[in-house]
């Protein structure tokens, strides 16, 4: 099974170098000898408080990929109802139960970027952010998010 | 976020004991895997008596319907209960028909070859990227074309191997999705949501069971068989069948695949005179 996985990952590597996906600025294996760990950088969608931010995502690919989904975590600190503030864990059904082998690492990164603009406060990993949104206080939500974007996701040195 | 100040260290060790979603999911999956561990993806043939045993202490209506079913369909093959059973049963039975020596020189067999090859085009024209579907398509075609030779794996062994079996299912799911998108006007009214959303939510993910809409679409995506589904339920009277036929093919000339449906699950049924793969 691992051979098919490697073949598929090589295809994805070639494909991601040729074609750009929406919001995905960078996507590459951590090192050339290991196709099972990748790093991605996604841009915050325009017209959202994440606009202008660059967010790093670490990707772990299981040996049963693409039948099983990759694990993705934000490395950059993100304030978002569906992202665990401390660990960067992402709550997106596509990465869990709704995964389909028709997705790729690249399209999944796009979907994660789009999640930034489309929070689902009813299944929160960050209850504080979700509560503000559930109260309907979008102004507070936007400015809180914006603060963290400017703190962690803008400029070249991200978190370091 | 009045309750907490922004932490200084962006990634301090987590103190809360709550398992992550990933851990919960892994746990669920391991439980499911344990439950299913002994069940092959596609089982050996069995007499319907085996099925009757399951209902020995059960409702009279089930026993009556099984009695009745046994007259025409004395044999069945159980399929693993993992949410993929409809697609697996369909793929298996289609392959079995293709492997059957009696179909080898038939007109149907030639049509079938062309139809199966055309599924790649069906997928790419619906927006699936060729690079990503190739692996599924190749394994699917190989499984369908399989001819048993000494030393080669048997058909059953192929469908019992996880990669070939799952990949075939994946290809069938994508064919279903592609057909739904291609003829969306036809299906949209039944989907209760836009077709693209329906495909992403209810067709593409593995382990999600097929319902009438997916079955109709798959029959039209691969218009090579009629599907007859025996419903084993508690409605009074005799056992009832649902039939699905491709729209643009002469259904009368096509072979029939018969499945047994119990809520949430499909198995394969064999009629008295059907050729079966041992």
Image: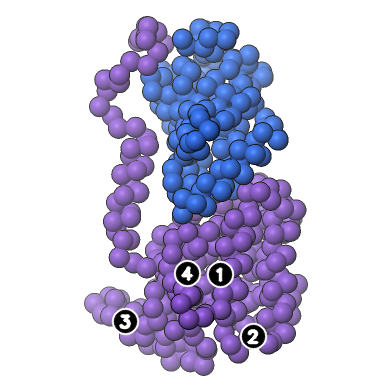
The residue located at (69%, 87%) in the rendering is: B106
Residue shown at 39% from the left, 78% from the top: B44
Q: Circle 3 sits in a helix, a strand or a loop, which is it? A: helix
Secondary element at tag 1: helix
Q: Are marks 4 and 1 on the same chain?
A: yes
Q: Which residue is mark 1?
A: B143
Which residue bears the numbered disc 4?
B158
Picture colour for chain A:
blue
Tag 2 near tag 4, CB within 8 Å: no
Residues marked 4 and 3, same chain: yes
Q: In the figure, B191 relative to B43: above or below?
A: above
Which chain letter goes with mark 3? B
Q: Assess disc 2: are there few (<14), some (14-19) or many (≥20) residues with their C-alpha within 10 Å of its C-alpha.
A: few
Does any portion of residue B190 appear in the rendered image?
no
Chain at tag 4 = B
Q: Is residue B151 above or below residue B88?
A: below
Chain letter behind tag 1: B
Determine contact: label 4, label 1, CB under 8 Å. yes
Residue B262 at x, y percent in the picture: 42, 70
Same chain check for tags 3 and 2: yes
Q: Are marks 2 and 1 in contact (CB under 8 Å)?
A: no
Q: In the rendering, at what x and y percent does residue B240 appear?
A: 50, 79
Chain B drawn in what color?
A: purple
Mark 4 element type? helix
Q: Which residue is mark 3?
A: B50
Residue B215 falls left or right of residue B37: right
Q: Name the residue that disc number 2 marks.
A: B104
Mark found first going from the N terminus, 3 or 2? 3
**Mark 1 vs 3, N-terminal side:** 3
Which mark sits nearer the N-terminus, 2 or 1?
2
């Amino acid at each position: 099974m691992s051979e098919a996985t490697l073949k598929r990952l090589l295809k994805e590597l070639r494909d991601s170098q040729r074609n750009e996906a929406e919001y995905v600025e960078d996507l590459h294996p951590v090192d050339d000898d290991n196709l099972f760990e990748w790093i991605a950088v996604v841009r915050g969608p325009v017209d959202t408080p994440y606009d202008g931010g660059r967010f790093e995502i670490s990707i772990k690919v299981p040996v049963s990929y693409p039948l099983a989904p990759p694990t993705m975590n934000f490395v950059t600190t993100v304030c978002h109802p569906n992202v665990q503030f401390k660990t960067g864990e992402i709550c997106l059904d596509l990465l869990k139960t709704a995964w389909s082998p028709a997705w790729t690492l690249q399209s999944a990164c796009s979907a994660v970027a789009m999640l930034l603009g489309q929070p689902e406060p009813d299944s929160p990993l960050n209850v504080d952010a979700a509560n503000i949104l559930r109260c309907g206080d979008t102004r507070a939500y936007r400015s809180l998010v914006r603060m963290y974007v400017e703190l962690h996701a803008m400029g070249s040195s991200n978190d370091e | 976020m009045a309750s907490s100040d922004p932490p200084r260290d962006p990634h301090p060790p987590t103190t809360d004991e709550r398992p992550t979603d990933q851990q919960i999911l892994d746990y669920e999956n391991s439980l499911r895997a344990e439950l299913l561990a002994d069940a092959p993806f596609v089982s050996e043939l069995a007499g319907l008596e085996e099925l009757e045993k399951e209902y020995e202490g059960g409702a009279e209506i089930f026993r009556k319907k099984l009695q009745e079913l046994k007259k025409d369909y004395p044999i069945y093959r159980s399929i693993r209960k993992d949410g993929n059973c409809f697609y697996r049963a369909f793929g298996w039975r289609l392959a079995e028909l293709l492997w059957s020596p009696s179909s080898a020189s038939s007109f149907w067999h030639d049509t079938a070859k062309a139809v199966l090859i055309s599924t790649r085009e069906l997928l790419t024209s619906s927006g699936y990227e060729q690079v990503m579907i190739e692996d599924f398509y190749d394994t699917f075609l190989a499984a369908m074309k399989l001819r048993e030779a000494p030393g080669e794996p048997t058909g059953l062994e192929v469908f019992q191997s996880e990669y070939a079996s799952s990949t075939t299912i994946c290809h069938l799911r994508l064919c279903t999705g592609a057909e739904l998108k291609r003829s969306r006007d036809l299906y949209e009214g039944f989907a209760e949501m836009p077709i693209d959303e329906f495909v992403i939510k209810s067709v593409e993910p593995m382990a999600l069971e097929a319902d009438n809409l997916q079955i109709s679409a798959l029959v039209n995506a691969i218009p090579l068989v009629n599907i007859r589904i025996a419903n084993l339920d508690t409605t009074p009277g005799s056992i009832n069948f649902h039939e699905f036929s491709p729209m643009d093919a002469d259904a009368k000339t096509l072979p029939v695949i018969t499945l047994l449906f119990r809520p949430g699950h499909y198995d394969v049924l064999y009629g008295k005179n059907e050729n079966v793969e041992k």
